[in-house]
Amino acid sequence: MTEDEPGLSRADADALLGDVFAPWVQDLNLSVETVSAQSAILRMPFDEKLCRIGGMICGQALLTGADTAMVIAICSALGGFKPFTTVDLTVNYMRPIANEDALLTAKIMRQGRTMVFCNTEITGSENGKLSAFSTGTYALVG
């Protein structure tokens, strides 16, 4: 599998959103925009239920979306779902996303035999400005 060759189809990646994640994560209504062997872009539609004052999407929703995007990227790199667990997850917020969808662009930085290191950039879908970024480390357990 090369970097440009998809490990999962977009339909398979979308199916994982319904099959692998907890119901409260599914309530974010994430959808897969694109997927490749080393990355995934997910869309989190704007929803008042995810907001604080002023129509700003709350940080908890954005971090959950970032983690989910990294999981989809890893599953694509592995050619499907395999057991792994989050070892470390951090996020840095720079500006709010308000009254627009969030785009979550996850990329695998390094994939080893037992560990995978990823990052996600979170931008507003309309303004395209970087709102937050997250890094994650995952341990393969199977």
Image (cartoon, grey):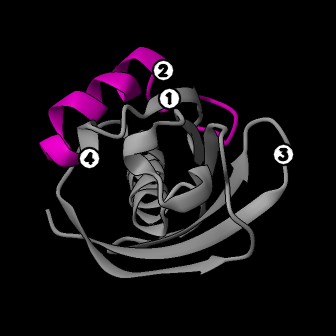
Q: Which residue is mark 2?
A: 10
Residue type at the position of mark 1? Val
**Label at residue 25:** 4
Residue 124 in the image: state x and y as whole percent: 73, 46
Whichever of labels 2 and 4 marks the residue nearer the N terminus, that label is 2
The amino acid on which the numbered mark 2 sits, given as a three-letter code, is Arg
Ranked by sequence position, the earlier of labels 2 and 1 is: 2
The segment highlighted magenta reads 1-24
Q: Are marks 3 and 1 in contact (CB under 8 Å)?
A: no
**How much space separates mark 2 and mark 3, taking CA atoms?**
22 Å
> Magenta stretch containing residue 14, yes or no?
yes
Outermost residue toward the top in this view: 11
Q: Which mark is residue 128?
A: 3
Q: Which badge, 2 or 3, is on the more N-terminal residue? A: 2
Tag nearer the camera, 1 or 4 = 4
Cα–Cα span, label 2 and label 4: 19 Å
Spatial separation of the CA atoms under disc 1 and disc 4? 14 Å
Q: Which residue is mark 1?
A: 32
Circle 1 sits in a helix, a strand or a loop, which is it?
Answer: strand
Image vertical order of residue 93 relative to residue 61, above or below: below
C-alpha separation, residue under disc 3 versus residue under disc 1: 17 Å
